[in-house]
Image (cartoon, coloured by chain):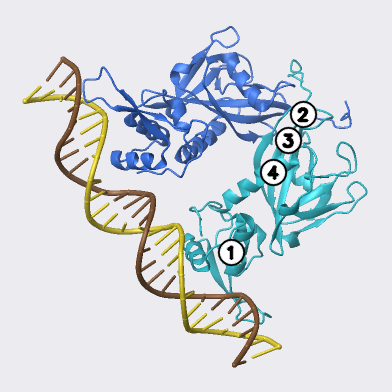
Chain colours: A blue, B cyan, C brown, D yellow
Amino acid sequence: MVLDFIKQEIFLAVDNVVFSIYKWELLVLLVERIKNPSKWSWALPWWFVEDDMTLKQSAYSALERKTQLKHLYLEQLYTFSATDRDPRARVVSTIYMALVHRDNIKPKVSDEAPSVQFFPVKKLPKLAFDHNAVLEYALQRLQYKLEYTNLAQYFLKDSFSLRELQDVYEIVMNDTFDVRNFRKKIHSLHMIRETWELQSNVNHRPAKLYEYIDKEKKVFDVLWVS
Amino acid sequence: MVLDFIKQEIFLAVDNVVFSIYKWELLVLLVERIKNPSKWSWALPWWFVEDDMTLKQSAYSALERKTQLKHLYLEQLYTFSATDRDPRARVVSTIYMALVHRDNIKPKVSDEAPSVQFFPVKKLPKLAFDHNAVLEYALQRLQYKLEYTNLAQYFLKDSFSLRELQDVYEIVMNDTFDVRNFRKKIHSLHMIRETWELQSNVNHRPAKLYEYIDKEKKVFDVLWVS
DNA sequence: TGAATAGTGTCTTTGAGACACTATATG
DNA sequence: CATATAGTGTCTCAAAGACACTATTCA
């Protein structure tokens, strides 16, 4: 090793803040700890970075240890480095935010992680490490990003009604918006288009279904509706 | 060490992108490398994280190795983790952006770092490691942040004319703005106030000088002038 | 009084926000 | 035809943007 003159006793980890939506609640994925420190408290799914993986790969693989998942949005947010984050050793953690449809993620039950489940962000327990602060930070970033990106798509199926889209915004922002102004604004951004489908099996007028036009393009004009 | 079951061969570093302004040019601080890899090319000032320092402290101290400085703004941007960033070993780097007035930073000359100097961002050499990409990323973030924060203050003295403030915006954004609309917008944000000073020793009508009201508060409404 | 830069106001256009009724499906 | 939700248009107000002339200092 050419860098033998550097002595570093720091572990590098990734913490995942996995958001999802179910029944008008914003959820976050937590894992119950079965070891000290903070045995029996809940924590964000996290793990150490492997030598041959990027941070993003590590974040993904930390999630795969605890869940089965597909079609997940993953984005780096920030790196937390307080020297006392973990009482056992110096651990620096890079935070990833993940957005996923509830149908696309299933907790994996195992001896190592018997309890993995979603909690409503409004009813969180006290978490291990600095994870309450991490989560709060991630929630702010999510709320902010929803305004000028098309990230809402990751909480929805491929086709969705405008009411479902508005629900996503209202749940994440923890606010309500005027139906007409919301639709006006969404249409003005040209990020979704009508499909030829309608809702079925509903006992009221069925809604038109929409889809995102360019799912890869992430950033649009500022969206701010009231 | 309790975490002995984790084997990690990763070095953690911080890279600084130090911006300043001088004579209508946006500058960035570079250090000439005197060792391989990339001997004799220029690189961002960076160093390894010490075990007992946070990332921000490490960023500051990496700068102090190469410069004398005061009154510096320092903010974490992103963590780069490609496995081949440094050919010698696995090095993960957290990027910090620094903003500083030209008068508040002086290169330190030493055997270890004989060449430390500012370059105009428009005339950059090819840099070592992935530092060209890092710099481009930081510049985008700076441009974006200037719009909704009062970070421009770090390029100015305590009191400044509106023309000097507009110069900062024009130089960073690489654009020009209408004088009247710029002033209207700045005033509407209520982030600066008049002092009772005027410019002196200028051979034209002296400008009123202004100062920032709340230097700590960073985020204001969106500023977007044309 | 000429050179150099500071400083100022109005009109037009665009987008945000408030607000109430009609349309269409099912049982 | 009752219930439930989808879907739609206009007015007002605020901010963005285009645009040209006067003010003040020094040499």
Chain containing mark 3 = B
Choose mark 4 or mark 1, whichever is in front: 1
Residue A82 in view in this figure: no
Image disc number at residue B166: 1
Chain containing mark 2 = B
Choose mark 1 or mark 3, whichever is in front: 1
Nearest to the observer: residue A77 or residue B5:
A77
Q: Name the residue under label 2.
A: B84
Q: In whole angstroms, how far apart are the C-alphas of marks 3 and 2?
A: 12 Å
Residue, x 54% and y 64% (percent of image)? Answer: B192
Could you classify mark 1 by the number of other residues whose Cα lies within 10 Å: few (under 14), some (14-19), or many (20 or more)? some
Residue, x 71% and y 27% (percent of image)? Answer: A12
Residue that protrudes farthest toward the front in the picture:
A196
Q: In whole angstroms, how far apart are the C-alphas of marks 1 and 2?
A: 41 Å
Q: Is mark 4 on a helix, strand or loop?
A: strand
Q: Is mark 1 on a helix, strand or loop?
A: helix
Nearest to the observer: residue A172 or residue A87:
A172
Can you tell which quarter of the image residue C9 is in? Answer: bottom left
Nearest to the observer: residue A126 or residue B177:
B177
Tell which circle, 3 or 2, labels the residue nearer the N-terminal end: 2
